[in-house]
Image (cartoon, grey):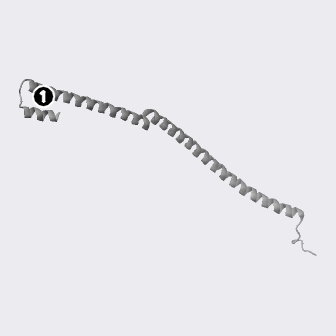
Amino acid sequence: MKNKKEEITTNDLAVMIKKGFDHVDERFEKVDERFEKVDERFEKIDGRFEKLEKRFDNLEATLENQYPDKNYLSDKLGDLAAEIGARIERKKEQDRQFKEKVIEILKRNSLAEKEEILFLEKLV
């Protein structure tokens, strides 16, 4: 026959199983608490990212409204280059007309020799 100490009753087995489950439950509760803390931290991080995203959106909108884009600058530079070219051509034409007028005056009033006038005409 078996010894009383060696005999395990159904109640004893149930108590042992309950203690085991209680211990597992405690561990799961601790894990749950840790996950809750991690969730809180992630929520804070999400909030910070949302604020950063809003700030970047605002900055991007400001830059788009405040500074011209590449196409605008390219068009504007093209317009300015054309205007500068036209001004240079007008100045060249005025300079040519001035030189021709001076040569005409020199010829009309015989203020220069023919060789000098020919030289000046070649420069024009």
Q: In the orientation shown, which residue stands out farthest toward the bottom?
A: 1
Q: Is residue 79 left or right of residue 106?
A: right
Q: Quadrant of the C terminus?
A: top left
Depth check, front residue: 83 or 93: 93
Residue lying farthest to the right in this orientation: 1
Q: What is the crowding at mark 1: few (fewer than 14 residues within 10 Å), some, or many (at least 20)? A: many
Up the image or down, 33 lies above or below 4; here it is above
Amino acid type at circle 1 is Ile
* Residue 69 seen anywhere in this rendered image of the structure: no
> Residue 118 occupies which quadrant of the picture?
top left
- Residue toward you, 105 or 81: 105
**Image x and y of residue 15, in percent:** 83, 61
Q: Is residue 80 left or right of residue 117?
A: right
**Could you say where residue 91 lies in the image, as x and y percent from the top left?**
23, 30
Residue closest to the eye, 23 or 98: 98
**Secondary structure type for disc 1:** helix
Q: Position of residue 83 (x, y in %)?
A: 32, 30
Residue at the spot of label 1: 103
